[in-house]
Image: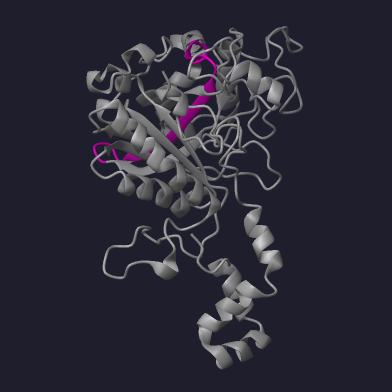
Amino acid sequence: MPETKITRREMLKLTGLGTLGVAIGASGMGGVIKLLNDEDNTEVKAASAQQIEPFYGGHQAGIQTPTQQHVYFAALTALVSSKAELQALFEKWTPLAERLMKGEPLEDIETANQYVPPVDTGDTLSSNTSHLTLTFGVGPTLFTNEKLGLTAKKPKALTDLPHFPKDQLDDAISGGDICIQACADDPQVAFHAVRNLIRAASGQVQIKWSETGFNSIPTDGGTPRNLFSFKDGTVNPSTNSDFNEQVWVDDRSWLRGGTYLIFRKIQMHLETWDRTALFEQENTFGRARVSGAPLGKEHEFDEVDLTLKDENGKPYIPETSHVFLAKQVKAKIKRRAFSYSSGIVTKTGAYDAGLLFISFQKNPQAFIDIQNSLGRNDKLNEYITHRSSAIFACFSGINKGSFIGEALFKN
């Protein structure tokens, strides 16, 4: 990405300095950029380096990584006609994904051929990496494509999710052979990454659907809020031990070290919610809106106690609340949700907005158990509708010298 190693914002700040004006006059803006690259921009480079997430490791980035502010999520249809071609696709993507996450353009700008289209679209030149992460997964339909010869490699748990209450799914924005989750603190950086990966794979994949989402991360790094104004993700794994227990697959299959990703686009009926009294909103979630504490407790991370009663002997947390029903099952998952806003529903004039629910779990049954417990009794159902659904098996991490999804292609 950054040809100049400094961001546009940083450049604008620097050009406000009188001393830099002298430098501009003497050597032109190109000379200034070179000057900044070559000399006293150590602090700038260090700040930029801090925004680079590691590409290599035991697990893919974008799962345990602290949640960024934006997501561009794409589900793809594979057009390749053999297992060898599919493997070649992931081999091609590996160095490109590494460069993107390091903030490097996909080709050397200085030596680029001027008579052909640029390899990198260039729309994030002079941007920093913004903690970009790229996470790759494969869906159930990839294994039913007989041309690819992967049927025997299909994990038993990798099947389409069952129908749940309030599901009104649109097939056009559900499923997919391959997914790429791009997360960053700059939406254009996330989009640029997927755009360039798809572009490099022209004729090998095509986009089936995509969604963009956003988060408002509190300045103290706390739990973000969804569009109903409640904290989303309080009960998440936090330690490596938690992730080993709840997220990473630990069997002997090719998916060892990977995980299952579940995607659900959930429309939130904001107009109805906004007409609902605060106490009813809190009873719907079973938590206080401001603090995020379970009802009857004081702090966000206080243990949920379903037996706790008020002075009248009435349970603080209603039996139809989201928290109460979810607490009935022992299953735990890693939530990594983003809000979305896609204009309005033209037929009704209502907001087309809500939640891009993304979760990671060792076994999809954990999500299914939670969703079944919520069932038709979940009071939150009055305010939401599920519009799309997808499941993917996300590969384990990438080691230097290997490629994305290598274990899938080993005999």
| Residue 264 pos. (x, y %) | 41, 26
Is residue 143 in sight in this rendering? yes
The reply, left or right, for residue 383 in relation to residue 66 is left
The reply, left or right, for residue 395 in relation to residue 388 is right
Vertical comparison of 2 with 267: above or below: below
394 or 336, which lies in front? Answer: 394
383 or 250, which lies in front? Answer: 250
Residue shown at the point (31%, 30%) measured from the top left:
84
Vertical comparison of 13 with 197: above or below: below
Residue shown at the point (67%, 30%) measured from the top left:
292
The reply, left or right, for residue 182 in relation to residue 237 is left
| Residue 404 pos. (x, y %) | 46, 34
Q: Quadrant of residue 20?
A: bottom right
225 or 410, which lies in front? Answer: 410
Q: Is residue 110 magenta?
A: no
Q: Quadrant of the C terminus?
A: top left
Q: Is residue 359 magenta?
A: yes
How many numbered circles does the render carry? 0
218 or 403, which lies in front? Answer: 403
Question: Start and end of the magenta stretch?
Answer: 346-367
| Residue 25 pos. (x, y %) | 56, 92
Q: Quadrant of residue 391?
A: top left
Is residue 212 in sight in this rendering? no
Q: Quadrant of residue 86?
A: top left
Vertical comparison of 202 with 109: above or below: above
